Amino acid sequence: MYNNLFSEITLKGLTLKNRLIMAPLYLGYAGEGGTVTDMLLEHYRLMASSGVAMVVVENATVDHPVGSGSNRTLRADTDDNLDGLKQLASIIKQEGALACLQINHAGRFAHATKEPLAPSAVETFGRMPKALENEEIDRIIDKYANAAARAKNAGFDMVELHGGTGYLLSQFLSPRTNKRTDEYGGILENRQRFALEVLTRVKAAVGVFPVGYRFLSDEWLPDGLQLGESRQFAKTLDQAGIAYISVMGGTYESFFLPEILKKSKQEGYMLNLAAEIRAGVDVPVIAAGRFATGAFAEQAISDGKTDLIGLARVLWADPQWPKKVRNGRESDIIHCNPDCADGGACMQMVMKGHPAFCVAWPAEKMKEWKTKFV
């Protein structure tokens, strides 16, 4: 049963025991200032023990505070946090999963600073970011390379560049947020230059070490990045030696639009985006977006729409999802409820700066976590 879902696959020399990935999910479990906490370690221990092949730790900043989405964003920009990162990588690998660290610069969505940076001065929820000078761009590229090297030193098996959710890498790609007239703006060849320079310098810093990419395929905004250009960019990433492409859609400016909220309640609501990208590349593709059942995930792989399945809130709601699917116990799965609140109660919590707890958890688990960690 589900022979595709539980078959092995190789990424740049690393063997994944099945096609299930814990996709990156920000829950606010790092400490104030981006430290590794007991709550963060316990969360990732549970995620790694679920049976997934790889865990992607979310959104570690390459440049605090100007690159941090919040003051609870995990930091990968300083050796002061190296021991904590080593603990994190170790606890994931001890539970039998590969460990990947996603590194990021939030750009105009950086809320840990009063003066966010961006490719261009485009207003963002009432704040105007500062347009980056070329020397600042070069400095940030170095920050990505240093953070990737730190992830390797901490014992992670690979690193993922966060080019999704409307963060800095995708801000350069988007014609909506990149109004530059220099070599980083204008035509796609120029708008993708920043991301490719980051990839090149990261690969130079880490050597033989897989580098994946969290990939924004469509902003779901009429004047934003869309599939026509993102398909071209995916081919360029493939040619540049990326280890995998983890496909998503939407940004903070589109997530809460009524039509997107409605779409996001459907099973596999981003699978069509992954299929579009996979059709044009040779590198493995990860699809995410509410894969609630094993049958749906198996069919997505069988149909050639994706190579791997990314589980985020689905796995957080029930860390036993992979084992229940594999052992024929799908009726026992605790499902993420898309109707728990507009946009998800968990997302509302983290947007207010609080650690998130899943309302679908059994009462005893909720009580245990709040007693131990809050």
Image (tube, rainbow, N blue to C red):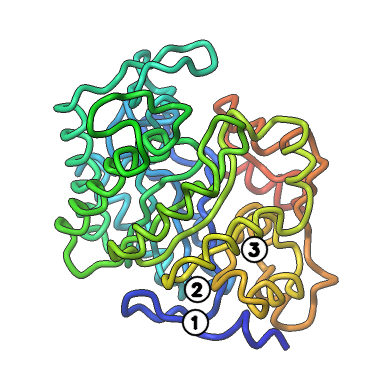
Q: Amino acid at mark 2?
A: Ala
Q: Nearer the viewer, residue 225 or 61?
A: 225
The first of marks 3 and 1 along the sequence is: 1
Q: Quadrant of residue 163?
A: top left
User: Mark 3 belongs to which amino acid?
Assistant: Pro
What residue is pinned by disc 2?
A: 53
Left or right of 90 on screen, residue 332: right
Q: Amino acid at mark 1?
A: Lys
Decide: is 53 above or below 266. below
Q: Foreground: 309 or 241?
A: 241
Tell me the number on the disc at residue 353.
Answer: none
Check the image and name the residue furthest to the front: 187
Which residue position holds label 1? 17
Towards the viewer: 259 or 7:
259
User: Is 255 rendered above or below residue 201?
Assistant: above
Callout 2: SS: loop
